């Protein structure tokens, strides 16, 4: 049913609650391709005069490298249950980048936690998940951190 599933993670334990749900889905449905996506927000422009361009670029590079390593580790958990697990790290506004990537790459299903790095105190549903839900015309799988196994 699903040929390509996009799993959005931000590195937080809250965002990881979607992993078990997607693993169960992929075991039962032999999904040919999973894309694990993490969006790194750009370095705040207002801080550039204080840290300098070089330091900011170096810090951003370290964040992207850490995101790739994290996603590669998570992808290993899926490789036995699906045809391929790809890792993608983008820079920008998380909700916008998730939606743009999904549209451009013919994603069939977006899977994400309702809460990520901002935690459950933010709103009843996280702002990134809310924006994706409001603007994605396709199928979505969401999970709350409470739905995770301890």
Image: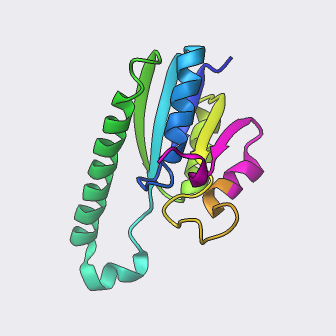
For this view, does 81 lie left or right of residue 99? left
Q: Would residue 17 be counted in the magenta stretch?
A: no
- Image quadrant holding the N terminus, namely top right
**Residue lying furthest bottom in this view?**
50
Q: Position of residue 72 (x, y in %)?
A: 32, 36
108 up-or-down from 97: above or below: above
Q: Would residue 144 be counted in the magenta stretch?
A: yes
4 up-or-down from 127: above or below: above
Does the image show residue 31? no
Task: Out of 150 and 93, give the one closest to the viewer.
Answer: 150
For this view, does 82 lie left or right of residue 143? left
Query: What residue is drawn where x is 73% and y is 43%?
Result: 136
Q: Quadrant of residue 129?
A: bottom right
55 up-or-down from 150: above or below: below
Q: Which residues are magenta?
A: 130-150
Task: Out of 102 and 49, give the one closest to the viewer.
Answer: 102
Q: Position of residue 92 (x, y in %)?
A: 49, 58
**Residue lying furthest front in this view?**
150
Q: Position of residue 7 (x, y in %)?
A: 53, 38
Query: What residue is drawn where x is 52% and y is 16%?
Result: 32
11 up-or-down from 28: above or below: below
Colour scheme in use? rainbow
Query: What residue is drawn where x is 50% and y is 55%?
Result: 14
């Amino acid at each position: 049913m699903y040929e390509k599933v996009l799993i959005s993670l931000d590195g937080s334990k809250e965002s990881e609650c979607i992993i078990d749900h997607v693993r169960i889905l992929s075991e039962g449905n032999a999904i040919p391709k999973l894309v694990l996506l993490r969006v790194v927000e750009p370095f705040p422009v207002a801080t550039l005069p204080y840290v300098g361009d070089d330091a900011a670029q170096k810090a951003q590079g370290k964040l992207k490298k850490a995101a790739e390593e994290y996603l590669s580790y998570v992808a290993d958990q899926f490789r036995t249950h699906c045809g391929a697990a790809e890792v993608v790290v983008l820079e920008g506004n998380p909700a916008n980048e998730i939606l743009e990537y999904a549209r451009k790459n013919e994603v069939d299903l977006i899977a994400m936690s309702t809460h990520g790095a901002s935690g459950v105190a933010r709103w009843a549903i996280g702002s990134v998940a809310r924006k994706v839900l409001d603007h994605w015309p396709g199928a979505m799988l969401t999970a709350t951190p409470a739905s995770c196994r301890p």
